[in-house]
Image (cartoon, helix red, strand yellow):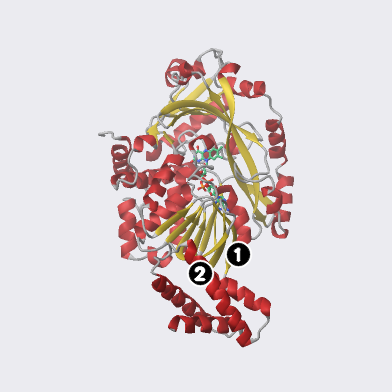
Amino acid sequence: MLYIFLEFFYVVVKVNKIDGTNVKRKAGILSIKIKSKLTKIKHPSVKYDFELYAKGGWIFFSLFCTFVTSKNSFCTQTTVMKISKEAYYSDVILIGTGIMSATLGTFLRKLEPNWTMRIFERMDRVAIESSEAWNNAGTGHAAFCELNYTPEKPDGSISISKAVKIAESFEVSKEFWASLVEQNIIQNPENIIQHIPHISFVWGEEDVNFLRKRYEALSKHHLFSAMQYSETPSVLAEWMPLILEGRDPSETIAGTHMALGTDVNFGTLSRSMFQYLEHSDEVELRLHHEVEDIKRRFDGLWELSIKDLDSGDMHYFTTRFVFIGAGGGSLPLLEKADIPEGHGYGGFPISGQWLVCNKPDIIARHHAKVYGKAKVGSPPMSVPHLDTRLIEGQQALLFGPFAGFSTKFLKHGSYLDLPFSVKWGNIMPLVFAGVHNMPLTKYLVKQVVQSHEDRMAALKEYFPNAKSEDWTLQQAGQRVQVIKKDETEGGVLEFGTEVVYAKDGTLATLLGASPGASTSVSIMIDVLSKCFPDEMATTQWQKKMLKLIPSFGQSLAKDAVLCEKTRKRTERVLFKTNK
Ligand SMILES: Cc1cc2nc3c(=O)[nH]c(=O)nc-3n(C[C@H](O)[C@H](O)[C@H](O)COP(=O)(O)OP(=O)(O)OC[C@H]3O[C@@H](n4cnc5c(N)ncnc54)[C@H](O)[C@@H]3O)c2cc1C
């Protein structure tokens, strides 16, 4: 009786637009709880057959209310639909199963094990977009070898602030992953992270001078003190034999070497975290379910419209916190959520391609990630690298990335992604960003029309003896670069990542791609701080954060002793070294 009364009260209040949001919300939530109790179905894992009965019953009941209240039918139909969706509440919804949702989900599970969580993924497997090993370079970005993180200032000195920030973030990521190993969430860390030296390699007077200055600036900082520098061919040949073979001995060359560098399999890492999440009764992961719409409801909850891609059925779920971790698919969903903070953003997709070596004897002779300098006018993520990968126990050798242009926002996306993302609010930033980035457009056109021999010529600058028949082209993931409004320029193209939050912290999303997966842990700590500030301030959460990240609240960049202690721990746990 109470249940029927509540439903009746709810419909009448809504249909008559009686003021009192809180009353409506409480009535709604209470009715969900009673429904769950009546049907003995555990929240949030409500079964489909229950949905059918519930919808049928409510629609019948609400039609009766329509008759009683004699209000306009459109309004009442909307109410009927809304009410039929009430049962699908969870405290948290994560969209996408890449490294970002995996990390945030694991944090939340550890911090609030009783919160209910739903995760939706459009693909039929977990983490097979950008986070999948072959779709990214697997570099544990720590600014050891990436020259674009240490730009030269107008006075000729080297700025290391960005490099320090990224190196510190990567140490924090390793701390978190080490805790997951200790808690048996990651069982075989050797399948996820391995040491592969990170090397920067340049040629020509100008670039050698740059690398020398970079080394001098970086090696003074404790995060980079283990860096080695050499211009001596015999030393460089030891570090990277393939790159020195067949090279003109009179050429001016230089390199830096960081033995601490890593290769990371972000796909396997994400899957380990989702396996852990799936074991909980409070968490439900639905594969082959695509989020089509996100709307704010009258009661402040977010309502997501989700298509079951197997049956074609639509389902509706509500939550008080949603994280859009949809990678390239995040921008269209942010547009649908229609928060003021998300207005004016656009996206520009750039796809990646690798040359992959198919000769085992050549693969075995290279054991490093060798990063060069991006050509003038080319975007930072096009920095060429000859890259050892360790994927599922197999060593591989890649060169790239080469850029491609596709209007898809995801590797498995639609060619309509880019045109459909253009809205009144972002059309001007898109146009201005295009006008201000003509060199990028020219670069992309050149990249797209390249032949296999053109790509081999680029490879031979690094590996002079490379043979065309030993290398094949493979498609990597899509990056969607952020375009945003700018007061002076009208619109700017950004190459980093950016988190967009709803003002009240009930929705967050990540746009952009770089440095991406390597800094996912720091990015998600920021999300937690902005979206759950009250909880983050409690001693309960602080204690749990310290268990996951022992340096939490302190600075590894400023405290050399803490940094050394932290590195000793992560080396022991992740790499099983006794140092
Ligand atoms: C070529 C290339 C090289 C890179 N190299 C590196 C590197 O060396 N080191 C590094 O740290 N980072 C690198 N990155 C960046 C890194 O791969 C990304 O930052 C990271 O994987 C992004 O993770 P994510 O969880 O945001 O997105 P993703 O891994 O792309 O996951 C998003 C998920 O959301 C799902 N999804 C999308 N839309 C919907 C929807 N509507 N409904 C339901 N599900 C949806 C997708 O299917 C996907 O599974 C590289 C990226 C590329 C493309």
Q: Which residue is mark 1?
A: 339
Quadrant into which the N terminus falls: bottom left
Q: Is residue 519 above or below residue 188?
A: below
Report the front residue among 212 and 198.
Answer: 198
Report the front residue among 102 and 37.
Answer: 37
Mark 2 or 1: the one toward you: 2
Q: Is residue 421 above or below residue 192?
A: below
| Residue under the image location 60 percent in, 79 percent down | 63
Q: Is residue 176 left or right of residue 62?
A: left
**Rendering coords of residue 358 (x, y %):** 52, 21
**Rendering coords of residue 239 (x, y %):** 43, 21
Mark 2 falls on what kind of element?
Answer: helix
Residue 380 can be seen, yes or no: yes
Q: Which residue is mark 2?
A: 53
Residue 403 is tagged as none
**Rendering coords of residue 299 (x, y %):** 53, 74
Question: Quadrant location of residue 41?
Answer: bottom left
| Residue under the image location 39 percent in, 48 percent down | 275
**Mark 2: which amino acid?**
Tyr
Q: Is residue 250 left or right of residue 367?
A: right
